[in-house]
Amino acid sequence: MMNKTQGKKPVPRSDDLDLSVVIPAFNEQDRIGLTLSEVAKYLRERKLRSEIIVVSDGSRDRTPEVVREKAREIPELALIEFGENRGKGFAVRAGIEKARGRYILFSDADHSTPIGEFDRFLPMLKEGISVVIGSRALADSRIEVHQNRVRETMGKSFNLLVQSLVISGLKDTQCGFKAFTREAIQRIIPRQRVERFGFDVEILYLARKFGYSICEIPIHWINSPKSRVRIFRDSFWMIWDLFRIRWFDLRGEYTEKLNAKCQSPKSQ
């Protein structure tokens, strides 16, 4: 599998950056350019020392070329390119592993949650919340364009399964706008096993397992009609992933890896 990383050389110290924005992308040539322009504009206006990492997960269109073209005008933009499609969870993990910011946000390539929503996330992260996630299901959420009825119904049904099988108390685990402190995500992401759409549940499960605070806040959200989620096929695998998460934990895969790291800490 080919992995190409392009962009500016990384800064030498991770704490020189306020924020890393990780954007997974699969066949996003029509949307990624505008999304990157909006994200870069926001970061400049807020004067955040930042980087943008796009992970092209086996894109078969011009997504990598569009990102490389945008990098000419956005110096903080880097591209990670894989030749094989592995899944959104795999792409997000690959981006986070390269991220150097004090806080790390991952956001969808379709910009369905406007980057300006991070204004509400940053104060909470600075106050010590480890994980802040956007939610479309809270009373104050502003849903500008809804999904069709079938997708909304299936999403609500999936959340009921999430709450009963894996992690309770969160109304929307699947919104693609989540932020983490660097300390929290560095502990979580090496234990991630799920590579496709069920990965959101897994990382939140791990966050709670490891005792990190999670705050769910309402967001502005605009449904994109070109969703990459195949409603029936992907829904089946997402449900299967819920059982896999419980199985991984029962087998001690999450805990054993954690203990191994604690016994042999690596210098940063």
Image (tube, rainbow, N blue to C red):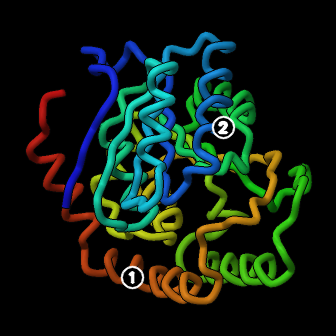
The image quadrant that residue 161 belongs to is: bottom right
Apparent side of residue 32 relative to residue 24 in the rendered image (left or right): right
How crowded pointer 2 is (Cα within 10 Å; few <14, some 14-19, many 20+) is rated as some
Q: Residue at x 60, y 24 (%)?
A: 40
Apparent side of residue 97 relative to residue 140 in the rendered image (left or right): left
**Residue identifier under label 2:** 34
Q: Is residue 220 above or below residue 6?
A: below
**In the rendering, at what x and y percent does residue 222 appear?**
81, 53
Q: Residue furthest left?
A: 264
Q: Residue at x 51, y 45 (%)?
A: 23
What amino acid is found at the position of numbered circle 1 in the picture?
Answer: Arg
Apparent side of residue 170 relative to residue 242 in the rendered image (left or right): right
Q: Residue at x 47, y 38 (%)?
A: 67
Q: Provide the secondary structure element on which disc 2 rests.
A: helix
Classify the position of the C terminus by image quarter: top left
Q: Provide the secondary structure element on which disc 1 rests.
A: helix
**In the rendering, at what x and y percent does residue 212 appear?**
49, 47
How crowded pointer 1 is (Cα within 10 Å; few <14, some 14-19, many 20+) is rated as some
Q: Is residue 35 above or below residue 56?
A: above
Q: Residue at x 61, y 20 (%)?
A: 43
The image quadrant that residue 229 belongs to is: bottom right
Q: Which mark is residue 39?
A: none
**First along the sequence among labels 2 and 1:** 2
**In the rendering, at what x and y percent does residue 224 appear?**
75, 59
Q: Are marks 2 and 1 in contact (CB under 8 Å)?
A: no
Q: Is residue 163 above or below residue 25?
A: below
How much space separates mark 2 and mark 1, taking CA atoms? 36 Å
What amino acid is found at the position of numbered circle 2 in the picture?
Answer: Leu
**Residue identifier under label 1:** 244
The image quadrant that residue 86 belongs to is: bottom left
**In the rendering, at what x and y percent does residue 177 appear?**
63, 48
Q: How many marks?
A: 2
